[in-house]
Amino acid sequence: MSLSRDEADALLAARHGDPFAVLGPHRTPQGVLVRALVPGAERLQLEADGVTAGLERTDPDGLFEGLFTDELGPYRLRAFAGEASWELEDPYRFGPVLGALDDHLLLEGNHQRLWERLGAHRLTHEGAEGVAFAVWAPNARRVAVVGRFNHWDGRRHGMRKRIDSGIWEIFVPGIGAGDPYKYEIIGASGEIEPLKADPFGFGSELRPATASVVERLDTLPEPRGGYRDASDPRRAPMAIYEVHLGSWQRRPDGGFNSYDLIAERLVPYAAELGFTHLELLPISEHPLDESWGYQPVGLFAPTRRFGDPDGFARLVRRAHDAGLGVIVDWVPAHFPTDVHGLARFDGTALYEHDDPRKGFHPDWGTAIYNFGRREVANYLIANALFWLERYGIDGLRVDAVASMLYLDYSRAEGEWVPNAEGGRENRQAEAFLKQLNEVVYGRFPDRFTVAEESTAWPGVSAPVHAGGLGFGFKWNMGWMNDTLDYVARDPVHRRFHHGQLTFGMVYAFSENFILPLSHDEVVHGKGTIVGRMPGDRWQKFANARAYYGFMWGHPGKKLLFMGQEFGQLREWNVNSELDWYLLGDSLHAGLRTSVAELNRLHRSEPALHARDCEAEGFQWIVADDADQSVLAWMRFGGPDDRPVAVVCNFTPVARAHYRIGLPATGTWREIFNSDAAEFGGSGSGNLGQITATADPSHGYPASAELFLPPLSTIYLRHG
């Protein structure tokens, strides 16, 4: 036997680190030696053009070899066991699929199309149809791809290691889309690790199964643009409907709807209500429903809960066809430690920090990415580009940015490691976020990124070249906390907390803000938006309508979590659908109608969106009437756009003859009144319009007297 006993034993035990060195065809001085490992075979025959020859069985466990003096072209193998026989391609006769440039770009951290090279790809290679597998595991001693196609047997498809990059690859002929697979890895310590899903897997099995699935990305519907403003999304209307697909609606039996059924129902619903974007809670595959998707294990795989990747692509396309943009919540801050995921992927802390003071998140029990490792940063940035390019996603809302930026986030003294300057800023995460935004905006200038960031880190939405992090927008968590706290108070006490409504204007233009009433505000005992309002049932809804009017009139883009548009009363429960029956009640239906009207005005009135991020678009009229809990301000668009006045009365007391200053005399139409009867209000107001006279007030050259309905917000447009 030409193969040493040690090497044969290593092959048969699936522990050989370089099976391509001994299996397949090899040129020798005597000719071409072909060696094959086919467990279960008693006889093995090689078939090529003009050649049919048996191979010698050199080990009873399935090792065969044969010497051929003539040059061999492509060949197939035929195996025999008893009366059974089967044909197979020899995976070890195929050369590499990847090249030196792939190694170089990964090590450099600049492989922007890394998802096209790693993972599982259906292709034709050296004349054969099959799947090319590639995975990064530089510290592994051996990697094999296993699946149903090889009986989950790590002996059959041990992979080739690319020494320069630590990528392992193999082309497996004869398999196709739909095949589940994992990687069997012998780690740096010599121990076999738990089977790992593919970090670049484009599909996955339905939980609780955890294998990756071979998917054909070339069959996905071609993405096309939805609601996009290529010039400057800061000056375009943006009213976002945030949705958790598993609990928006469910089947009658309580099961999940498919992506296609969700598209059929959700897209027209959001479009008819006038929202501009859908924001979907993390779509990436995740093992636990109760994590809401924020502990993903398959960043490249749309969750199988609702169907396959094609189904998700159709959902995005249907949204685009309806004029809706699609934002996906994206989670690069951390990942769960499930054994089939990224944790200690090759037996070492590959994607995470080894030191738990840097690499473990105490709040969520998750691992933290090593943002300073170029290959890890490349993996995450390539994933962001993948969603934008292959699925046509319009925006990425980046989750938990604050946890990334601070080394001491949720850590007590002594539980974190200062940076090189002795500070608490995570400079590696900062550099990663800057690189992410530069690459995303460089490749896709018509898309945008959003930071969920709750601290005073400067310039989150400022360009990188100006010293910022480069995000397009930032969630305004301070505004959200202050205003929700205010509206939850009894109106008799609001006069003492008036600053909670006005303080947001002190910093309103320091960032490009989105005003979020998100999923986080309707869980964990916080109640719902309507549920936290004070007063009797009518007052609760009046408060909510007035608050939404305040929010839609305030500078900043808008975000509302599902169910809050019609006054969901129960806290959000990830395991059940929204209480749609409530729409049979006039107050709930009226609240939804008011949101639809606010969205219509937000789109149609440039003054209400064009200068959301510019101080010139806002001017106070009344900021100091705390005793009556009244606020009023002006919104301006461009020089040719009609200005809009917003007036809020946050007490249940109607106020007649309330005078406000205005920038121009003449007719001001009442274009919105949250107390309108069609919204469930009392129907009081200003009979559709007021007339401003040349009587200066509040620093303006004109003024008018208004009737302010109880617990209301009204909009007045000039002309």
Image: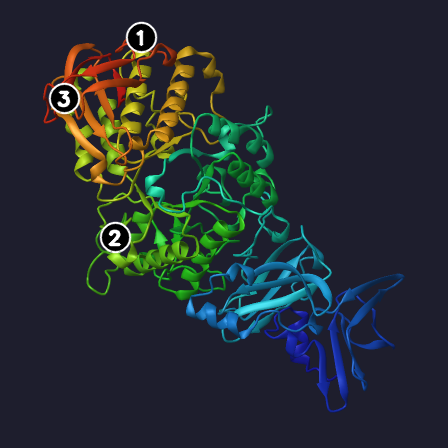
Q: Residue at x 40, y 65 (%)?
A: 374
Identify the secondary structure beneath mark 3.
Answer: strand
> From the viewer's perspective, is the residue at label 3 or at label 2 nearer?
3
Identify the secondary structure beneath mark 1.
Answer: loop
User: Taking 105 as reference, is 411 left or right?
Assistant: left
Mark closer to the chain start, 3 or 2: 2
Q: Which of 97/88 is in front?
A: 97
Identity of the amino acid at label 1? Ser
Residue 442 location, x and y as percent?
40, 57
Q: Residues within 10 Å of mark 1 (few under 14, many from 20)?
A: some
Q: Circle 2 is placed at which residue position?
A: 408
- Image quarter hosting the N terminus: bottom right
Question: What is the C-alpha distance between the residues marked 1 and 2?
Answer: 51 Å
Mark closer to the chain start, 1 or 3: 1
From what the image shows, is residue 373 above or below residue 683?
below
Q: Circle 1 is placed at which residue position?
A: 682
Question: What is the C-alpha distance between the residues marked 1 and 3?
Answer: 29 Å
Identity of the amino acid at label 3? Ala
Q: Circle 3 is placed at which residue position?
A: 702
Question: What is the C-alpha distance between the residues marked 3 and 2?
Answer: 53 Å
Marks 3 and 2: CB-CB under 8 Å?
no
